[in-house]
Amino acid sequence: MKPKILIIGAGGQIGTVLVESLVKRYGTGAVIASDLKELQTPCASIQLDVLDANKIAQTIEQHQITQIYHLAAILSAKGEQNPIRTWNINMEGLLNVLEAGRTFNLDKIFYPSSIAVFGKATPKVNTPQDAPLVPETVYGISKEAGENWCNYYYKRYGLDVRSLRYPGLIGYQSLAGGGTTDYAVDIFHYAVKNKDYTCFLNKDTRLPMMYMSDAVRATIELMETDKSNIKIRTSYNVSGMSFSPEEIYNEIKKHLPNFNIDYKADYREEIARSWVESINDSQARKDWNWKEQYDLEKMVADMIKHLS
Ligand code: NAD
Ligand code: SER
């Protein structure tokens, strides 16, 4: 049966691209985009606060929704400015979505987790799927708890919730929304305008990253794979590439030789230092054949081509 999809938090960095991809794949009538703010989308869109459980229920009934992609959240850097509000939005939002999924017996739910679930107790290189998780940001704590709630709803109620631990995401279609990895998007917008860039992380701080087209493809592949293939009901490690600010700068310089960078680390450096450098995603490769298409070189060339 053709899905009828509600995307919550569709106006952000990922939602902007995911809406387009889902509309292309399933048709305009199959997707409803929603966000706190008004949206311009190729499909129908509504204003919806994920904290409003009644409106979620009304929307599911009115549009005969069968799947939810729940993207609304406060990200790592912005989250530290108001920890309690971040916890409330991230956790109550997810619980509203899971309860709606259970009550209306929805077919599937997608929940994005993050590399922010990792902490200093986690092995930093080639981080395994079942690594210890002791996150240090409120955002990471909410994502780690969220993963366990997803697992709980699957085990207790049979709700088909699927999840990925996205690395930092980079795309030309949208700006990043308050995370620690935002520098890897911002840097391109400065470079193509011939402006110098001041990076808020140190030059050697390596983080796992992924190109947006890989992230969106991973999301849709995970959601479309047969239920029997899904062995992880918390959240899958997925990997694209890893680099430091200096390494992405050097790659951009190959295209734009006059581009300059300097470094002025702020509180986001501390957050980044608590995360890991590279991800082992062998479980995702084995279970549903995940494979990235973009490495640093290919991603930088594509970003500059589109933004120039
Ligand atoms: P974003 O901040 O760009 O977008 C989030 C959207 O949610 C915004 O449009 C915002 O208006 C909306 N929103 C906020 N509060 C809301 C509410 N109460 N009700 C409805 N909508 C609300 O975030 P993003 O980068 O697109 O991330 C989407 C999801 O992916 C998040 O859950 C995030 O934690 C996760 N994630 C993102 C990254 C990344 O690098 N972008 C990495 C790992 C995980
Ligand atoms: N890119 C996100 C952030 O930096 C990771 O979830 O918050």
Image (cartoon, rainbow, N blue to C red):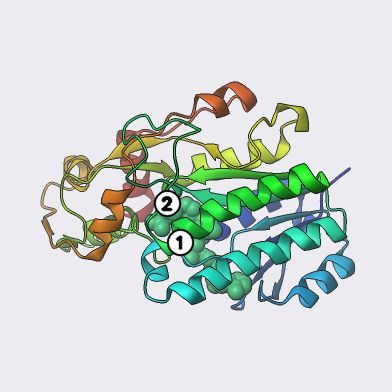
Taking the image as shown, residue 299 lies to the left or right of residue 268, namely right
As drawn, the label of residue 103 is: none
User: x%, y% of residue 253?
Assistant: 16, 44
* Mark 2 within 8 Å of ligand 2, using the beta carbon: yes
Q: Amino acid at mark 2?
A: Ala
As drawn, the label of residue 139 is: 1
Taking the image as shown, residue 221 lies to the left or right of residue 118, namely right
Identify the residue at image location x=72%, y=37%.
224
Q: Amino acid at mark 1?
A: Tyr
| Pointer 1 local density, CA inside 10 Å: few below 14, some 14–19, many at least 20 | many
For mark 1, give the secondary structure.
Answer: helix
Identify the residue at image location x=11%, y=55%.
260
**Disc 2 designates what residue?**
116
Q: Contact (CB < 8 A) between labels 2 and 1?
A: yes
* Ligand 2 visible in quadrant: bottom left
* Mark 1 within 8 Å of ligand 2, using the beta carbon: yes
Tell me where residue 34 sits by quadrant: bottom right
Taking the image as shown, residue 126 lies to the left or right of residue 29, namely left
User: x%, y% of residue 187?
Assistant: 26, 57
